[in-house]
Amino acid sequence: MELKRVVVTGLGAITPLGNSTPELWDNILNGVSGAGPITHFDASQFKTRFACEVKDFDPSKYFDRKEARKLDIYAQYAIAAAKEAIENCGVDLETIDKDEVGVIFAAGIGGILTFEQEIAYYYTNKEQGPKFNPFFIPKMISDIAAGQISIMYGFRGPNYSTASACASSTNAIIDAFTYIRMGKANMIVAGGAEAAITPGGVGGFNALTALSTRNDEPTAASRPFSKSRDGFVMGEGAGCLVLEELEHAIARGANILCEVVGGGMSADAYHLTATHPDGLGAKLVMKRALKDADLNPEDIDYINVHGTSTPVGDISESKAIKEVFGDHAYKLNISSTKSMTGHLLGAAGAVEAIVSVLSVVNDIVPPTINFTEGDEDPDIDYNLNFTFNKAQKRTVNAALSNTFGFGGHNASVIVKKYSK
């Protein structure tokens, strides 16, 4: 079977750095941190009292008040990002064959806020008997964003959610890419959303000692590859990409941003929350992505790393990059945009894929901010170009984006400049 070519024709983003893709990109290039004190709930008794929250999000721009009440905030973010991406891709919704358009939209956790609110209400009012909102389950489940987007636009192609913790939305993109190149859809709206800055989300990650506790300087807390890193910063939001079969995009005169050329998946098979210390899964997933894309290591110009600012994770990823890319590792750019957006969990892969696409389109690599002092561990080689603190202009013909999730789930996707 001849595989189809797959291109990106639309982008949408709701993030701590802005509620549109242009806002995200502008702030990313300028090294802006999205971190600040938590406002979604009273976090005064928590070990971590800051996060990268979405700011000034107005649901009324996307749906009426009645509809908004039926949607957890994570699904609201998803729909808003999808709306921007679909508008950005310029498709004529009146003439497109909606049987051939799918939605694959991820969430690592889903409607945790709805879950917390409904269960809390039950236990504080249980003398009244079990009273639950009839929309409790549809608001909470992690597949509902994909369903809501398909219902809104009438897209009847493949429709589901992927869940692989922090790799979830990269898996959604890889699945969409695979379906299209196998001829099973003409277009797929792919991405991920998350809204876990809640008492349960922050408290749970605090219990794992996964979050930074740098409460005195939130904007400097996410500091990948710095010696003083002490954990990740929670983020929230959504990212969405419209993937499309090349000939379909050409036929409708679409603005083609770049081409998706490969994806890889692997498992660490090691630990519930920690990456393999030797980066075995990370090495395997990058090698598989390169093989799938039919590219050599020397063809990659930029890696948007998982880079969460955790003591162990940054070391294993750096080690894996050196082993996979050899001498070329010193010629490519590496950066962690989580230093600015925080860690969007199930939405991280989609947002970072958007950044990778825009790096290819604009020939510029965003920075890893907040670097202060190098780690003494020899497995972080500071002769590598981590693009510390300032964006760098360079030709970016191809970019690779890594995401690794609790449970040992690894996913990488590669995008490159489109050429006929």
Image: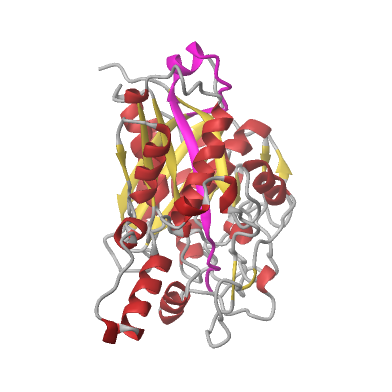
- The x, y position of residue 343, in whole percent, is 52, 61
Q: Is residue 233 magenta?
A: yes
- The x, y position of residue 10, in whole percent, is 54, 32
Q: Is residue 88 magenta?
A: no
Say whether residue 298 is visible.
yes
- Magenta region: which residues? 231-259
Q: In percent of the image, x 55 and y 79: which residue is there?
A: 48
Left or right? Give the position of 141 relative to 216: left
Q: In percent of the image, x 32 and y 57: which residue is there?
A: 141
- The x, y position of residue 303, in whole percent, is 54, 45
- The x, y position of residue 183, in whole percent, is 30, 21
Q: Is residue 225 positioned above or below 43 on the image?
A: above
Task: Say how many tags the image has.
Answer: 0
Residue extending farthest top: 251
Q: Nearer the viewer, residue 15 or 42?
A: 42
Q: In percent of the image, x 41 and y 57: which residue is there?
A: 166
Q: Nearer the viewer, residue 94 or 230?
A: 94
Q: Nearer the viewer, residue 228 or 413?
A: 413
Q: Nearer the viewer, residue 298 or 257?
A: 257
Q: Is residue 396 positioned above or below 200 on the image?
A: above
